[in-house]
Image: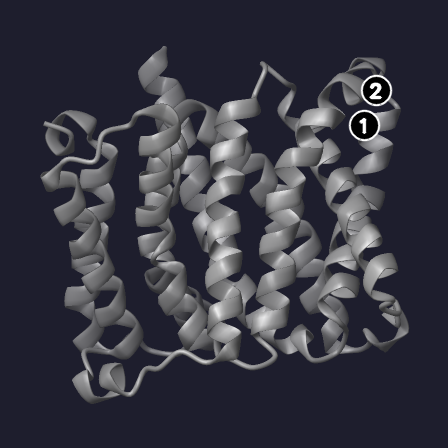
Amino acid sequence: MKNTSDLQAHLYVLLATFLIAGSFIASQKLANTLNPFSLTLLRFVGAIVIMAPFILTKKVFRNGILKTLPRALIISFFYSFYFMGMFKALKTTTVLNTATLYTLVPLMTAILAFFIFKEKITLNKLWVYIVGLIGTIWVIFKANFDLFLSFSLNHGDYIFLIASVSMCFYSISIKLLYKNDNAIVLVFCTLIGGALWMSLGMLVFQKPLNWQVIQGELIYNMLYLIIGTTIITLFLYQKSTVVLGPSKVMSYIYLNPVAVAILLFIIDNKSIDKIVIPGIIITSIATVMLQRDRKVLK
């Protein structure tokens, strides 16, 4: 039974990885239209509106809201802070830079899990994290050493680094605060909490909504973020993190550049350069090894 649950959790986080991969491109297209508070708030409000009829019409779900919401407020703080930071960062940095920095999340999560959950980071496990990082860098920079050397941090990159730390705490907080909650109710409460945090931020910093500027193709990008990378990924990550733990779930981030390459091939028919195939193999092996506790932790 446990093996079946683990397999399902792995499939959940793998699907979430592909959904997240498409969010970087969609987010960059939206980043310069609205301020980060307004964009993130619109994302959460849209998701709440879609989920509300399913939650509020069932008594079992309604009864779980009040007991789940206090913990969801903490979880949603880190979740919403990450996306606000991402939108803010993409105003002054590139998808390439953010995708590169995002690969630091698994290692940062493992370090936090060590202090909070006493999850050991052995030398073998640390080596696998480094190998995974090398593999993702290979994919992102297409084995071009000159392109890698030209990589430098700017103001937006520092913002995204802080946001990435918040994503680590989001994963940690799910594992720490989960109390056999109904997954759908926890997702709904997390969205409510995120909307509350963003509304508070808008009031404090006096930011306008200006949602009317989201028109044309931007509407589809926003719908993708609302449904694909807010509602669905929240559910998938929260379900899988409870079963697998934050370190294993975050290790799938190494596959993010691979997922982007595959999606570009499927959607835009952009061929995958042969030079990145070794990097794809390396990241895949590293991700698999990080799922096998007995092999990596010994």
Q: Give the alpha-carbon distance from disc 2 to disc 1, as whole Å.
A: 6 Å
Rendered location of residue 136, percent (x, y): 27, 63
Asked whether the beta carbons under mark 2 and mark 1 sit within 8 Å of each other, the answer is yes
Residue at the (23%, 84%) spot, across then down: 149
Q: Along the horizontal axis of the image, is 255 left or right of 213?
A: left
Residue 281 picture quarter: bottom left
Quarter of the image where the C terminus is located: top left
Name the mark on residue 288: none
Q: Along the horizontal axis of the image, is 236 left or right of 209?
A: left
Residue at the (79%, 78%) spot, across then down: 216
Where disc 1 sits, the SS reads: helix
- How is this picture coloured? one colour
- Residue flagged by tag 1: what amino acid is it? Ile
Residue under label 1: 55
Rendered location of residue 169, percent (x, y): 50, 41
Number of numbered discs overlaid on the protein picture: 2
- Residue flagged by tag 2: what amino acid is it? Arg
Quarter of the image where the N terminus is located: top left
Name the mark on residue 62: 2
Among numbered discs 2 and 1, the one appearing first in the sequence: 1
Where disc 2 sits, the SS reads: helix
* Image height of 153 relative to 165, above or below: below
Residue 75 picture quarter: top right
* Image height of 156 relative to 199, above or below: below
* Image height of 67 relative to 114, above or below: above
Q: Residue furthest top?
A: 1
